[in-house]
Image: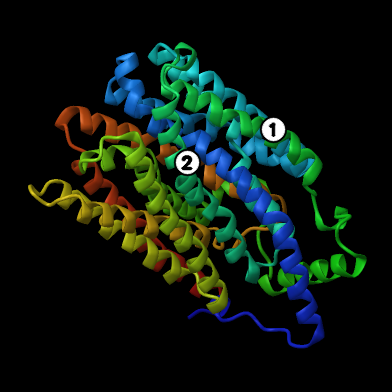
Amino acid sequence: MTTREQELPVYAGVEQTEEDAVYRKVSWRLLPFLGALWILAWIDRVNIGFAKLQMLDDLKFSEAVYGLGAGIFFLGYFLFEVPSNALLQKIGARKTVMRITIGWGLICMVQAFVSTPMQFYILRFLLGAFEAGFYPGMILYLTYWYPSQRRAKAFGTFMSASALAGVLGGPIAGWIMTSMGSVHGMHGWQWLFILEGIPSVLAGVAAYFYMTDKPEHAGWLAQHEKRLIRDALDRDNREMGERGSDWRSLFRNPVVWLLIAIFFCLLCANSTLTFWIPTIVKETGYASPMAVGWIAAAVYLCGAAGMILNGAHSDRHGEVRWHFSGAALVGALAMGTLAVLLDTPGRGALLPLLAMGLALVGTMSAIPVFWQLPNRYLAGGAAAIGVALINSVSNLAGFGAPYLMGLIKNATGRVSPGLYVVAVVEAIAAILVLSCIARKLKKEE
């Protein structure tokens, strides 16, 4: 184990007890609200996977059109994420989150009225452009509050909202699509977009009044509580040592591109599962949107637990590489197993669904741990822009993977060949962390 991965010192006594109490207060104030916003963002991003079950037949779209539309979201994400994070650092989180959340909610609602592939592509691009900056912005925002030894758990709790979105989003989507069809002459998938976009617009307004940009601006903290947070952050900065703070150096920093490659490989798997779980469930024999929704909910509930538990365990042991790589390898092996099972005649529904669930749990559990890595190398302006750069370039996987799956499904009539490819790519993420990241940390000892 490297020096930086040894357990961080425990500060005993009254001060540490008070610090723990303050961070419990901070977590209860920040994380439920941020998690709720991420649930709304995730639902509005991935509800297309459920709408697909009806939308393709109604609009006569092919699987490839769906795959491109699902993935083109990430082109908007890629182009606008870095500017959004730079703006957050300048104007603060409240104004940034309000702008982002209201924007994506409105675009989600307008998707109900698409009738051509081009309209579909444009709106998916705009949805990505508006949502760009929220996820990396919240990663940056939490570093304003939490020292590194508390971040993985905070990240895991916040990010687990994407899994909870699957828990809530599946049954809700199934109910809307089943119950609202033909209401006022519109299809169930149209009502899905409208009804799931409205809460995001309202939440964007609430964010402006509820959020606090930085600890020193928090009227809900006493002065001594603000001091404890500042002391914890200052102590953490000293322990982390010298890190790059000039954002202009990012583009020639090989570690940044290594981190991009690692996260890109992981997001290939995550995006594939996100946009194709409803289709995979349907291929196991469950055709009803309501049944698909409840099965997806159960799978995502396990994913949420995995994110929180793996993040907390990583914090307790001060270890990152194996917590990331172990989870990613589990995800890759389970995805490969899922592909084998889908191609096996007479295999029933239970085993493929279990493999799919394990693939999602492994993949999602690696995500919060990954975000500990950039903070080992970057600080200040470089951290703000670096997190956005890593996330935006890596999320191009979200464009490529769903589109590739659509092309493969069109060409072969099966999703399993695409799953084999994605399983190998996810395994590469684990190998890169175990080899290259280990070597980099050793050189810094």
Name the amino acid type tagged 2.
Gly
> Would you place residue 317 above or below residue 32 in this image?
below
> Would you place residue 200 above or below residue 351 in this image?
above
Q: Name the disc covering residue 169, or none.
A: 2
Task: Compare residues 386 and 54 and report the one nearer the observer.
Answer: 54
Dot 1 falls on a residue whose secondary structure is helix
Dot 2 falls on a residue whose secondary structure is helix
Give x and y (percent) for residue 239. Answer: 69, 74
> Would you place residue 137 above or below residue 324 in this image?
above
Q: CA distance from mark 2 to mark 1?
A: 18 Å
Q: Is residue 298 rendered to the left or right of residue 241?
A: left
User: Residue at label 1?
Assistant: 202
Name the amino acid type tagged 1.
Leu
Q: Residue furthest right?
A: 223
In which quarter of the view is residue 55 placed? Answer: top left
Inspect this view and state whether residue 293 appears: yes
Give x and y (percent) for residue 205. Answer: 74, 34
In which quarter of the view is residue 405 placed? Answer: top left
> Would you place residue 102 above or below residue 417 in this image?
above
Q: Name the disc covering residue 14, or none.
A: none
Q: Residue at x 42, y 71 (%)?
A: 322
Crowding at label 1, few (<14), some or many (≥20) Cα neighbours within 10 Å? some
Task: Compare residues 57 and 235 and report the one nearer the observer.
Answer: 57
Q: Residue at x 12, y 52 (%)?
A: 347
